Image (spheres, grey):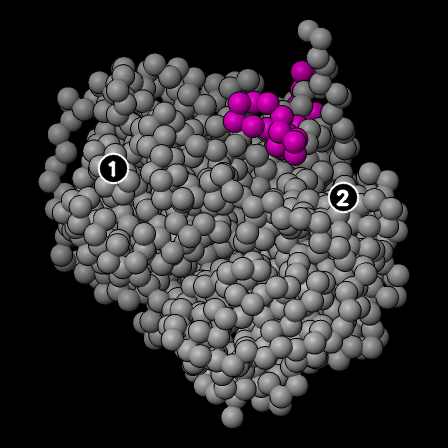
C-alpha cells in the first residue's frame, strides 16, 4: 500500500463521555464536582446539545436535588409541576378511567422538555469545567495496546458518498482517556459494538426495546391544563402489543403527546407511526389537538428489558451508563432519573477508582438496579397480552417484586412472524385528517438534516437478503417500522431495489433493532447531522 | 403629495420589465412618478420609459462613466437628483440591490427592501425569513423613503404613456477606485436554478439518471433552469446542488414545473413563492396537487415528450 | 493587511419558522441559532486570503447581546485571530449597523471588510453597500470569486445577467454570495484554542454610534398558503392554459 493516512491528531482527557444526554451530562458534572482536577470531555453528535434528545418527559427530581441542590431557584426553561394523573383505557370511540398504578403516581414530579433540560445541564457542566463538544460524532472506539478501550475516534468530516475525501475533508481526531463513558442512549452504535466484542450480554437476557414517537403541539389558548399528566392504554393497539400513549400538558398552551409501543410485536405489517397517528384521532385526543399546530416531532427507541436484560456495564477502560446500559424503568414510564443516577454512580466510582473496574458491582449494589429489580416481572408479563400483563403487574406491585421468580425476555427481532403466518385483526382504524399527513411530513417537523454527499450511515450487511428472503417472508418490514420513511422498495425495470433515504433518518435506531435478519447496521453519520429537535 | 423617482434598469438598449413593475408599486404609493435613466446612448431606453403609462417625466443622464452599471457612479447621480423626491425606488434585482442601499446611506436613510405591498405612503409589507413571514414596515415621513420593489409581487404597468424626457448633466465624475471589466452572460448554458424565470424539476418517478434527460430536454426547450426533489437526489439521479426544498434551494420562478414529484412538505417549502406551479404526476392523491395551480394526472413518460412536441 | 468579517447570529437556516401568535415576531424559544450562512462564507474567504499570505489578521465581529459570543467563538475556532462584540441589546437596522462597522473599520484601519450579502433573518441585503457608501470606498457585492493583487480586488459578481467582473481598489467592502466557497468544518482542537483567543467587548456608544432604528417593523404574519388550482385533462389543455396566462 502506497498511501498511508496521516496520524490522527490526539487530545488527552481523563474521562471522555460519549453522548450529552441526561446520563452523560450528570456523570460529567458529578465528576467535576468530586474531582476538580479531572479533565472531562463530552462528545455529542447532535448539532447542539438537546438536538437529538426526545423524551416525554415527566421526571423524578431526586437526582437533580443531589446534583444541583438549588436547581429550583434557576430551573430549566420548560419545567411544570405535575398537578394530576389520569390513566385511561381507550376503545375506538369510548374510554374508561383506570386507577393510576402506584408506580405512575407523579406527585412531586415535574414535566420538562428533556432537550431543554440537557441544554441547561450542559451549561452547568461547562461552568464546572467540563469541555462539551456538540457537532462531533464518536465514530469508532480507540483501543489501547492491551486491548482495552482507550478513548474514541471522532468521525471524519467531508467524506463523499463514494467514500472519497471532498475539498472540505477534515480528519477526525482521537480522544484518549483513562475511562470512556458510553452514554449514547438506547442502542448506541459504539455500545452495541462493545457489548458484542466484550460479550457483555453473555449472562443476561437479550435487551428488549420499544419505539417512542412524540409531537410537541402549540394549541389554541386555554385548552391546555398545565401540569396535567394523562396516559392511555388500549386502542389503537391490539391486545398483544405492549404500549400506550402519554399526553403532558405544559405551559404556554403547549402540549406534548407521544406514543410508545414494544418492538416485540409480531405483525410484520404493523406500522408504529400509523398507530400513533390513529391514537391522535381518538375523540378524547382529537378534540384537544384540533386547530393546533405541530412545533416539533420525532422518534427514539427506548430500552425496556430492565433488570434481566441489563448487560455487564463495565469492560476494560469503559463503562455503559443510562439507556446505553438499559436502566429505564418501564412500569414507571421513566428513564431520566435512572439515567442520571446511573451517571452519578459511575462518576462517584471513577472519581475514586480512576478506572472502570468495579463499576458493574457498584451499579448492581446501587438503588438504580434495586429499582429495576423490584419491577422486573411487570414488562415481561405483557408478552402474553394486555390483560394477563395487568394481572402480573398487580401481583408484582402488591408483592413489591419479592416473589422468587424472574420472567425472561426475548430478542425483539425474533418476535416478528412471517407474513403468511399472521393475520392482523381489524383494528378499526380511521381516516385521518390531523397533521402530519405522512411520515415525510413528520420528518419535516424533526428538521432532520444530513449532507446527502456522505457515506450512507445505514449499512446493509447482506443486501441480497432484502430483496429475496426478507421480501418473501416478511414483505419488507423496514418500510413500515421506520418512523421516518428511510426505507423504500422502489420498482425498477430489473426488479425491486431498496432505496435508503438516509437523509430522513431521525437516529431512532428502530431499524437496527427490529430488522428480522439483523442486516441493518446503524452507524453514526457526519457530526451535526440528524434531527434538530426543538424543546423535545 | 408624494413625488417618486424610479431608477430604470436596462442594458443600454432595452428597458428591463422590472422598471414597469416599479411603476405599479409607485402608483400604489400615489403621486408624481419620474424615472431616471442613467447610462450612455440611452435614447431608446428613455423613450421606452416615457411610454409607460402613469409616468410624469423621464430624466436622462448620459455620460461615458455611467455606461457600466457601477453603483459607486450611479449612486452619486441619484443622490444629486434626490432632493424634492419623497420616495426613491429601484427594482430588487441585483442591480437595484447593489445600488439602492448605497443611495440610502448617502442620504442618511434606512432602506425598505423587497416591497411587496403598499398600505400607505410610508407603510409597506415585505417578506422576511426567506418569505416565511411577512411584516409591516412603517418608515418615517421626514426622511426620503428608499426602497427596492419585489418585482415578483407587482404586475408591469401598461404602455401608452407619453412622458416628457429631460436631459440632465452628470453631477459627479467617475470614481477612480472602481473599474468595470466585463460581463459574461450565461448565454448558451442553462439558466441558473435560483434566478431562472422558469424551472423544470424532476422527482424520483423519473426512475433513473438516464431518464432525467427528459427533464433537461424540456427545460432547454423552455429556456428553463433544472431542479430536482430530494428523493431524486438521494436516488443519485442528479447532483445535490440541484435540490429544491427545505434542505436545498429556495426558489421563486415565475413558472415551476414539478414532474414526478409527490410534493413532500420539504419540497413545497422551497417553491412556495413560485408564480405558477404546474404539477405532472400519475398519483392523483399526490400532495403536490393540493398546491398546484395547474395539475395534470398521468404518466410523465408520455406527457413530457408530448408537451415538448406541442411547445416546439 | 487586516480583514474584518461580520458575523450575525441568526435562526438556523434549517429551522422551520413559526410566527408568534401575537404577531410580535417569530418563535425563537428552543430554536437553534447559527452563524448566518453567508457570513460563514465571508469568513472562509478571509481565512483563505490570510492563508495565501495576502492578509495579516482576520478579525470577526458581531453586534448583539452576549449570546452572539457563541457565534464569535465559532468564528475563532474556524481560524479568525480575534473577535469584537459590539454590545447592544436590540437588533440594529442596517444603517446603524453600517455606522458601527465603519467606526470599527476605521479604528482597525482595515484593508478589507468581507460581509455576507444578506442575513437570512431580515433578508435586507443592505449593510455592506451602506458601509461602503459611508466609508467612501468601493463595493463589490454578490462575489462568487475574489482575487487580491497589488492593492486591488478583482471580483466576479453574480448578477441577474450573468457573471460581471469588476476591479476595486482597497480598502473596499466585498459582500459574498453562496458559490464563493464552501466553508470549512471546525476542528475539535481548534474549539479549545478558540477559548483562549481574545474577544473584546465594546459598547456601541464607545464607537460613537447611537441606535437609529427608525423603521417600525410590526405585524408578523405567516405567508398566505397556496391553494389548489385547476386540473387539466391533457397536454393540449396544459399548453393553452399556460399560453392564456402569458406564461410561455
> Is residue A136 visible in the rendered structure shown here?
yes
* Residue at figure coordinates x 53%, y 23% from the top left: A162
Residue A147 in the magenta stretch? The answer is yes
Chain letter for mark 1, please.
B
Up/down of A230 relative to B51, above or below: above
Q: CA distance from mark 1 to mark 2?
A: 46 Å
Residue A507 position (above or below residue A26): above
Query: Which mark, residue A484?
Result: none
Within the image, what quadrant is residue A518 found in?
Answer: top left
Q: Residue B305 at what x, y percent from top left?
A: 25, 34
Q: Is residue A509 shown left or right of residue C175? A: left
Tag 1 and tag 2, C-beta contact below 8 Å:
no
Q: Secondary structure at mark 1?
A: helix
Which residue is located at x 71 percent, y 54 percent?
Answer: B180
Residue A41 relative to residue B188: left or right: right
Residue farthest toward the top in the current orientation of the protein: A1
Foreground of the two, A500 or A133: A500
Q: In the rendered image, which residue does mark 2 sit on?
A: C147
Residue A340 seen by the camera: no
Residue B168: percent from the left, percent from the top? Answer: 66, 78
Residue designated by label 1? B309
Element assignment for label 2: strand
Q: Position of residue B301 (x, y in %)?
A: 24, 32
Highlighted range, magenta: A146-169
Bin the neighbour count of mark 2 within 10 Å (Cα to Cα): few under 14, some 14-19, many 20 and up.
few
Quadrant in which residue C223 is drawn: bottom left
Amino acid at each position: 500500500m502506497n498511501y498511508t493516512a496521516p496520524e490522527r491528531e490526539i487530545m488527552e482527557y481523563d474521562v471522555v463521555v460519549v453522548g450529552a444526554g441526561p446520563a452523560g451530562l450528570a456523570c460529567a458534572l458529578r465528576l467535576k464536582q468530586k474531582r476538580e482536577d479531572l479533565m472531562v470531555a463530552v462528545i455529542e453528535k447532535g448539532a447542539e446539545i438537546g438536538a437529538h434528545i426526545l423524551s416525554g418527559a415527566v421526571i423524578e427530581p431526586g437526582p437533580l436535588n443531589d446534583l444541583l441542590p438549588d436547581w429550583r431557584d434557576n430551573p430549566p426553561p420548560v419545567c411544570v409541576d405535575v398537578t394530576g394523573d389520569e390513566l385511561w383505557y381507550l376503545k375506538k370511540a369510548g374510554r374508561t378511567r383506570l386507577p393510576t398504578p402506584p408506580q405512575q403516581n407523579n406527585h412531586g414530579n415535574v414535566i420538562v422538555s428533556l432537550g431543554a433540560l440537557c441544554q441547561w445541564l450542559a451549561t452547568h457542566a461547562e461552568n464546572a469545567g467540563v469541555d462539551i463538544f456538540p457537532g462531533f460524532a464518536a465514530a469508532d472506539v480507540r483501543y489501547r495496546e492491551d486491548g482495552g478501550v482507550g478513548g474514541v475516534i471522532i468521525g471524519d468530516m467531508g467524506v463523499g458518498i463514494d467514500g472519497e475525501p471532498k475539498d472540505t475533508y477534515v480528519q477526525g481526531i482521537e480522544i484518549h482517556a483513562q475511562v470512556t463513558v458510553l452514554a449514547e442512549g438506547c442502542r448506541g452504535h459504539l455500545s452495541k459494538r462493545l457489548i458484542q466484542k466484550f460479550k457483555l450480554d453473555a449472562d443476561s437476557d437479550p435487551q428488549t426495546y420499544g419505539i417512542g414517537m412524540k409531537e410537541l403541539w402549540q394549541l389554541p389558548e386555554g385548552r391546555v391544563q398545565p401540569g396535567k399528566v394523562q396516559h392511555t392504554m388500549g386502542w389503537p393497539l391490539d391486545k398483544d402489543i405492549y404500549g400506550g400513549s402519554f399526553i403532558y400538558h405544559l405551559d404556554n398552551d403547549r402540549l406534548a403527546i407521544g406514543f410508545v409501543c414494544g418492538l416485540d410485536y409480531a405483525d410484520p405489517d404493523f406500522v408504529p407511526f400509523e398507530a400513533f397517528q390513529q391514537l391522535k384521532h381518538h375523540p378524547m385526543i382529537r378534540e384537544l389537538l384540533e386547530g393546533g399546530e405541530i412545533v416539533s416531532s420525532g422518534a427514539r427507541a427506548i430500552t425496556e428489558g430492565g433488570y434481566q436484560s441489563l448487560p455487564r456495564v463495565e469492560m476494560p477502560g469503559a463503562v455503559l451508563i443510562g439507556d446505553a446500559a438499559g436502566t429505564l424503568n418501564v412500569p414507571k414510564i421513566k428513564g431520566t432519573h435512572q439515567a442520571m443516577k446511573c451517571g452519578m454512580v459511575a462518576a462517584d466510582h471513577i472519581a475514586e477508582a480512576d478506572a472502570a473496574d468495579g463499576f458493574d458491582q457498584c451499579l448492581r449494589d446501587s438503588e438504580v438496579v434495586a429499582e429495576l429489580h423490584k419491577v422486573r416481572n411487570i414488562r415481561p408479563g405483557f408478552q402474553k397480552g394486555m390483560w394477563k400483563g395487568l394481572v402480573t403487574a398487580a401481583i408484582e406491585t402488591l408483592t413489591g417484586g419479592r416473589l422468587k421468580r424472574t420472567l425472561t425476555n426475548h430478542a425483539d427481532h425474533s418476535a416478528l412472524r412471517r407474513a403468511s403466518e399472521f393475520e392482523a385483526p381489524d383494528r378499526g382504524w380511521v381516516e385521518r385528517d390531523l397533521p402530519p399527513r405522512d411520515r415525510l411530513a413528520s420528518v419535516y417537523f424533526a428538521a432532520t438534516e444530513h449532507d446527502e454527499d456522505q457515506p450512507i450511515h445505514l449499512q446493509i450487511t447482506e443486501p441480497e437478503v432484502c430483496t429475496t428472503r426478507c421480501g418473501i417472508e416478511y414483505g419488507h418490514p423496514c418500510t413500515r417500522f421506520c418512523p421516518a420513511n428511510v426505507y423504500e422498495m422502489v420498482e425498477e425495470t430489473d426488479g425491486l431495489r431498496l432505496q435508503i433515504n438516509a437523509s430522513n433518518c431521525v437516529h431512532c435506531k428502530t431499524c437496527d433493532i427490529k430488522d428480522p435478519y439483523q442486516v441493518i447496521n446503524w452507524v453514526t453519520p457526519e457530526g451535526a447531522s440528524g434531527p434538530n429537535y426543538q424543546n423535545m | 403629495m408624494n413625488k417618486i423617482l424610479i431608477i430604470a434598469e436596462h442594458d443600454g438598449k432595452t428597458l428591463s420589465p422590472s422598471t414597469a413593475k416599479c411603476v405599479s408599486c409607485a402608483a400604489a404609493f400615489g403621486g408624481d412618478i419620474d424615472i431616471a435613466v442613467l447610462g450612455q446612448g440611452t435614447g431608446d431606453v428613455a423613450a421606452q420609459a416615457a411610454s409607460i403609462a402613469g409616468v410624469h417625466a423621464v430624466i436622462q443622464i448620459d455620460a461615458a462613466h455611467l455606461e457600466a452599471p457601477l453603483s459607486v457612479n450611479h449612486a452619486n447621480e441619484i443622490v444629486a437628483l434626490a432632493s424634492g423626491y419623497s420616495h426613491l425606488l429601484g427594482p430588487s434585482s441585483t442591480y437595484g440591490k447593489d445600488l439602492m442601499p448605497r443611495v440610502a446611506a448617502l442620504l442618511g436613510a434606512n432602506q425598505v427592501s423587497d416591497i411587496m405591498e403598499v398600505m400607505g405612503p410610508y407603510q409597506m409589507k415585505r417578506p422576511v425569513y426567506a418569505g416565511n413571514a411577512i411584516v409591516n414596515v412603517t418608515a418615517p415621513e421626514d426622511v426620503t423613503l428608499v426602497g427596492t420593489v419585489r418585482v415578483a409581487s407587482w404586475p408591469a404597468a401598461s404602455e401608452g404613456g407619453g412622458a416628457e424626457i429631460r436631459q440632465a448633466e452628470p453631477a459627479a465624475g467617475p470614481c477612480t477606485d472602481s473599474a468595470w471589466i466585463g460581463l459574461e452572460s450565461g448565454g448558451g448554458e442553462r439558466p441558473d436554478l435560483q434566478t431562472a424565470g422558469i424551472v423544470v424539476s424532476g422527482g424520483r418517478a423519473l426512475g433513473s439518471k438516464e431518464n432525467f434527460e427528459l427533464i433537461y430536454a424540456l427545460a432547454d426547450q423552455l429556456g428553463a433552469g433544472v431542479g430536482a426533489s430530494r428523493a431524486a437526489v438521494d436516488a443519485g439521479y442528479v447532483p445535490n446542488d440541484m435540490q429544491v426544498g427545505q434542505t436545498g434551494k429556495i426558489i421563486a420562478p415565475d413558472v415551476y414545473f414539478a414532474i414526478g414529484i409527490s410534493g413532500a412538505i420539504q419540497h413545497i417549502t422551497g417553491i412556495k413563492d413560485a408564480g405558477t406551479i404546474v404539477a405532472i404526476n400519475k398519483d392523483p392523491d399526490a400532495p403536490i396537487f393540493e398546491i398546484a395551480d395547474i395539475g395534470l394526472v398521468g404518466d410523465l413518460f408520455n406527457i413530457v415528450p408530448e408537451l415538448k412536441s406541442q411547445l416546439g | 493587511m487586516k480583514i474584518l468579517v461580520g458575523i450575525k447570529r441568526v435562526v438556523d437556516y434549517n429551522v422551520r419558522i413559526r410566527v408568534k401568535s401575537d404577531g410580535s415576531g417569530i418563535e425563537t424559544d428552543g430554536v437553534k441559532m447559527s452563524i448566518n450562512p453567508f457570513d460563514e462564507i465571508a469568513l472562509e474567504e478571509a481565512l483563505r486570503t490570510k492563508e495565501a499570505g495576502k492578509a495579516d489578521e482576520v478579525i470577526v465581529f458581531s453586534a448583539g447581546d452576549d449570546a452572539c459570543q457563541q457565534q464569535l467563538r465559532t468564528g475563532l475556532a474556524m481560524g479568525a485571530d480575534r473577535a469584537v462584540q459590539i454590545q447592544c441589546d436590540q437588533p440594529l437596522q442596517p444603517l446603524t449597523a453600517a455606522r458601527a462597522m465603519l467606526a470599527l473599520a476605521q479604528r482597525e484601519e482595515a484593508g478589507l471588510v468581507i460581509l455576507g450579502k444578506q442575513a437570512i433573518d431580515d433578508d435586507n441585503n443592505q449593510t455592506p453597500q451602506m458601509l461602503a457608501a459611508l466609508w467612501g470606498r468601493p463595493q463589490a457585492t454578490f462575489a462568487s470569486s475574489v482575487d487580491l493583487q497589488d492593492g486591488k480586488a478583482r471580483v466576479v459578481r453574480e448578477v441577474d445577467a450573468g457573471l460581471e467582473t469588476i476591479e476595486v481598489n482597497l480598502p473596499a467592502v466585498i459582500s459574498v454570495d453562496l458559490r464563493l466557497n464552501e466553508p470549512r468544518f471546525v476542528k475539535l482542537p481548534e474549539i479549545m484554542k478558540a477559548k483562549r483567543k481574545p474577544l473584546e467587548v465594546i459598547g456601541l456608544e464607545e464607537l460613537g454610534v447611537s441606535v437609529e432604528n427608525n423603521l417600525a417593523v410590526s405585524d408578523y404574519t405567516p405567508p398566505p398558503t397556496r391553494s389548489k388550482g385547476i386540473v387539466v385533462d391533457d397536454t393540449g389543455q396544459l399548453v393553452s392554459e399556460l399560453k392564456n396566462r402569458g406564461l410561455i
